[in-house]
Image (cartoon, helix red, strand yellow):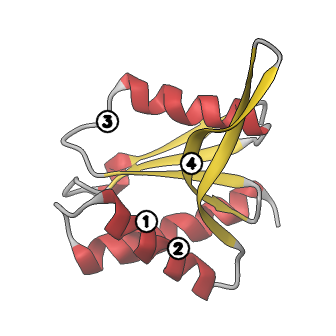
Amino acid sequence: MHENDISYIIRGAAFKVHSTLGVGLFESVYEAALAYEIAQKGLEVKTQVPVPMMYAGIKFDVAFRLDIIVEDKVIFEVKSVSELIDIHHKQLLTYLKLTNKKLGLLINFNSSSLNQSIIRIANKL
């Protein structure tokens, strides 16, 4: 399955979760519901995935943890904040670079309009 197809399914699941749960909950609540909805579509979902990094020639296995990865292709970062800021975008781009993945989605569930709160970030796509 291509990254764009996976992205379409993730966005559909995000809209369903947002309309069901509403705004103002912890990120972990949205993450659990999203992982469930995406898995219901028959896709492989992993949550809280460690992302290693290299520093001074040493591999650090749990330097970072990404929220969700779908089909080992698309990284999905869940936020529940008053507004997305530049560091959120950079965080996802860093995960994409460290994992050599091409596509990531950054979604802020603390928004009345989820359509305005889904950010697509590409890495060499």
Going by the numbered disc 2, the residue's amino acid type is Ala
Going by the numbered disc 1, the residue's amino acid type is Glu
Question: Which residue is denoted by mark 2 in the rendering?
Answer: 35
**Mark 3 or mark 1, which has the lower sequence index?**
1
Going by the numbered disc 3, the residue's amino acid type is Leu
**Mark 3 or mark 2, which has the lower sequence index?**
2
- Asked if 101 appears above or below 5 in the picture, the reply is above
Question: Which residue is denoted by mark 3 in the rendering?
Answer: 84
SS at badge 1: helix
Question: Which residue is denoted by mark 1 in the rendering?
Answer: 31
- Asked if 85 appears above or below 30 in the picture, the reply is above
SS at badge 2: helix
Query: Residue reaching furthest top?
Result: 56
Please provide percent x and percent y for residue 62: 63, 41
Q: Are marks 3 and 2 in contact (CB under 8 Å)?
A: no
Q: Residues within 10 Å of mark 2 (few under 14, many from 20)?
A: many
Q: Residue at x 57, y 76 (%)?
A: 38
SS at badge 3: loop
Question: Which residue is denoted by mark 4 in the rendering?
Answer: 66
Distance in Å between CA atoms under marks 3 and 2: 21 Å
